[in-house]
Image (cartoon, rainbow, N blue to C red):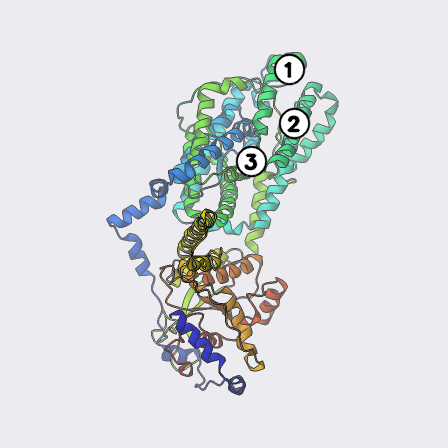
Amino acid sequence: MEPSEASGQRDTQALLSTTQEMELRRRDYQVERPLLNQKQLEELGRWSSVTGTHQWRTWLQCSHARARALLLQYLPVLAWLPRYPVRDWLLGDLLSGLSVAIMQLPQGLAYALLAGLPPVFGLYSSFYPVFIYFLFGTSRHISVGTFAVMSVMVGSVTESLAPDEDFLQDLNSTVNETARDAARVQLASALSVLVGLFQVGLGLVHFGFVVTYLSEPLVRGYTTAASVQVFISQLKYVFGLQLSSRSGPLSIIYTLLEVCWKLPQSVVGTMVTALVAGVVLVVLKLLNDKLQRHLPLPIPRELLTLIGATGISYGVGLKHRFGVDVVGDIPAGLIPPVAPNSQLFAKLVGNAFAIAVVGFAIAISLGKIFALRHGYRVDSNQELVALGLSNLIGGVFQCFPVSCSMSRSLVQESTGGNTQVAGAVSSLFILIIIVKLGELFQDLPKLIWLVTFVATILLNLDLGLAAAVAFSLLLVVFRTQLPHYSILGQVPDTDIYRDVAEYSEAREVPGVKVFRSSATVYFANAELYSDTLKQKCGVDVDRLISRKKKLLKKKELKLKRLLKEEKLQRQAGPLEPAAASKGTSVSINANTSIRDIESNNMEGSKAKQVSAGKELEDTAASGQEDAKAPDGSTLKALGLPQPDFHSLVLDLGALSFVDTVCLKSLKNIFRDFREIEVEVYMAACHTPVVTQLEAGHFFDASITKQHLFASVHDAVVFALQHPRSGPVSPVSVTQL
């Protein structure tokens, strides 16, 4: 519809008398139809079940296009790297990769100690998996590598299956550390291979949805509790104590009691070293927070502490003079690949599955956060494959299982990282350390590494995870994870709406899409609900919004350039009268079209005639009017394709409850579809659900109760009477 036509229609509506408006409101809503039971309804609508063979035929098709699509799906780097904007993103990725590598170095050394392994294997685990994820991952911002939670879980396995007691030398009852470390490295690498096999297998069978059963409260509770275990497990390094190896339920409690019992045996030099290092880290963190606006990059506090501690340890001789335990020999160069010992798999299978699930849950949670923030999508199944290959190939090169680190991921994003090129840069920096500089850190004292993540207190990590998952699974029904989604059409001469795929006589109402889920919407399927809605509507909503924002940004930049040129002309000399009057009408509003500036045709909005009879229409349409953009920012004005429908009706009759994730998902649906000029309505909510919507503060100025209708038919009729844009649908309201 042209702007003049839309304006004329609004003027016509404004001329309706109050009496006519009140008469329309007084009319009773009546539907005359025979009483239909389910059998009669199926006969009238010619119901037939939908077969699933067509989808299988699609999966089994073999063609060049499908082969290329599969290649790009499982090797995403081939899709985004050729289109990489070098000029815009390369500098940010280089700086980000360097910043992450500076953090990765000390974390890799420290987390290897948490895993019960020599520190150099932390460097290996910071190189191989990171580079593999660069090739196969879909998240642009997470930093894959060593992680405290994963290291503690690995450490519980290595210390339980290869305890110090098994490597005592007969003569002096001391531990043969060389043999012990070799056995633990073999266990950790076999564990990494098994974790990778689990993750790759689950990803290939599209089992990524399993992570939705690890709800946010479960993951946060699990990771928060594990921070206690990380802290307690490092107390022996802080006080320089020799403790017995323990595993299983209540092991952390016994470890804490033993630490308290042996406190009089503490090494003073180790305590002072840990205290000084902790104070330096805290001071540098406070300095970072205070100066972050003035610094191009954060102060590398971990690296500075590492270099300082290493230098002091070497110069003063902390190991020989004060008995401070140091990292020890760090061999230079890479090691050849080694096949894992498959005989260990039977002992490791339970722990491997727990570590695989926890590592994936942490990675996908962070990946989705960054994806939502930056407007792209991560594929949960491909993330499983990418993490699995990182652990699988890393295990062959004697790495231990890895995931992603929240602290490094935040640094990677905040320092300008745009893609996993930053991850590749950080891995290459670690490679240089391994090949040439690793031996410089052999005098580094074992510092405590305080982190804010995960482990179960009373139970061991694997048992704690199993108990938490089992409890979570009892709260949900599997059918709610994979409900039936459908687009509804009207059964002829009734106010009944059924799935158009099952009822051949059911017809979609032109201009209105009606969408329904057979199950309630909650944290486990909210994302699937939103994705399926966009898919079944036949519009790539996310891509359309992205293109719209890019065009508006270009228009804004062009407007600013015109304003700047006009300002320069004013400073250069007086303008012609016509030009001067034109300049006074220029607006900085990015949504204003250039045509309006040039023609000085900026019109004010016409005053509306408000009456008591129009109260319902005005209130219900207020959200639409607020959301309408100026003519210059509409899809049509920007040259973008418009959806073939103006209204979307969500049939929420299946909702039995709503949670915070559901509320957020519904709000996002309203926001996204209004961005592409489609108004959204809800229908058939039960009273308890409406109460929960109110309690969750779902309704506001843009989404009111007048967007919620008693039935789908009510919403469809209202949508036809009040289209968001364009003329009223050719389908007569009386025909419904």
Q: Nearer the viewer, residue 195 or 632?
A: 632
Can you say whether 308 is above or below 463 in the image?
above
Tell me where residue 391 appears, x and y as whole percent. Answer: 44, 35
- The 10 Å Cα crowd at callout 2, few under 14, some 14 to 19, many 20 or more, is some
Q: What secondary structure is found at the residue carrying circle 3?
A: helix
Marks 3 and 2: which is nearer the front?
Answer: 2
Look at label 1 and name its amino acid: Leu
Q: Mark 3 points at which residue?
A: 153
Tell me where residue 629 appears, x and y as whole percent. Answer: 47, 63
Q: How far apart are marks 1 and 3 (CA)?
A: 31 Å
Q: Which of 651 and 457 is in front in this view?
A: 651
Q: Which of marks 1 and 3 is nearer the N terminus?
A: 3
The C terminus - image quarter: bottom left
Marks 1 and 3: which is nearer the front?
Answer: 1
Direction left: furthest residue:
63
Tell me where residue 726 appears, x and y as whole percent. Answer: 40, 71
Tell me where residue 456 appears, x and y as whole percent. Answer: 62, 40
Q: What secondary structure is found at the residue carrying circle 1?
A: helix
Look at label 2 and name its amino acid: Val
Look at label 3 and name its amino acid: Met
Q: Residue 318 carries which label?
A: 1
The N terminus - image quarter: bottom left
Q: Which of marks 3 and 2 is nearer the N terminus?
A: 3
Q: Distance between the residues labelled 1 and 2?
A: 18 Å
Q: Mark 2 points at which residue?
A: 280
